[in-house]
Amino acid sequence: ASLLLSAALFGLVVPSLTPVFPSMALAKQLRESGCSEPLVASSGYHEPSLVFLAGTATRLTDAAGAADVLAGGDCRFAFVELRQERSFGQRADALGLLYAPVSRIEAFNLGAGRSAIIAVFRSGVVAR
């Protein structure tokens, strides 16, 4: 019985916890991007687990800083929390930045104790 309970726990319950662990979902976006060495800037979502999962080069910054990182080349990603998306867009427009929205992650940020919607943007794909 304990084997069945363990299998159910790890097979059904743990995968459904992704909304509680946004860093895991964001890191998955990077793994599926096709980039061998993606560079990430995160604006508004500054969980230490993100640095461990996305790489130690991950920059925890503000919205303008995230746009600046995207402007630096290909295979760069910005994770922008909903509350900072407007500032990110303004800075990106000022830079004439080429970028594309990849996805949105809806989750609960345990560290902040509130829900979070995080947009994922990628550099150099299409003009916005």
Image: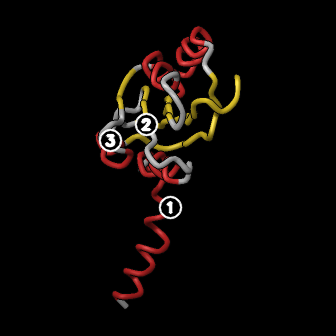
Quarter holding residue 95:
top right
Residue 63, x across and y down, in percent: 47, 19
Disc 2 element: strand
Which percent across, then down, holds residue 102? 62, 39
| Residue nearest the observer in this picture, 18 or 88 | 88
Looking at numbered disc 1 in the image, what kind of residue is underneath it?
Ser
Residue shown at 37%/37% (left/top)?
Answer: 113
The disc placed on residue 39 is: 2
Q: Earlier in the sequence, mark 3 or mark 2?
A: 2
Whole-percent x, y for residue 45 in the image: 40, 32
Q: Which mark is residue 51?
A: 3
The numbered mark, 2 or 1, whose residue comes first in the sequence reads 1
- Mark sitting earlier along the chain (1/3): 1
Kindly tell me whether residue 85 is visible in this rendering.
yes
In this view, the mark in front (1 or 3): 3
Mark 2: amino acid: Leu
Residue at 34 percent of width and 87 percent of height: 2
28 over 89 or under it: above or below: below
Q: Residues under labels 1 and 3: Cα distance?
A: 22 Å
Going by the image, does 107 lie left or right of 55? Answer: right
Quadrant where the image shows the C terminus: top right
The residue positioned 35% from the left and 30% from the top of the image is 59
Q: Residue furthest top?
A: 94
- Give the structural element (helix, strand or loop) at label 3: helix
Q: Which residue is mark 1?
A: 16
Q: Answer whether residue 117 is visible to the viewer in this image.
A: no
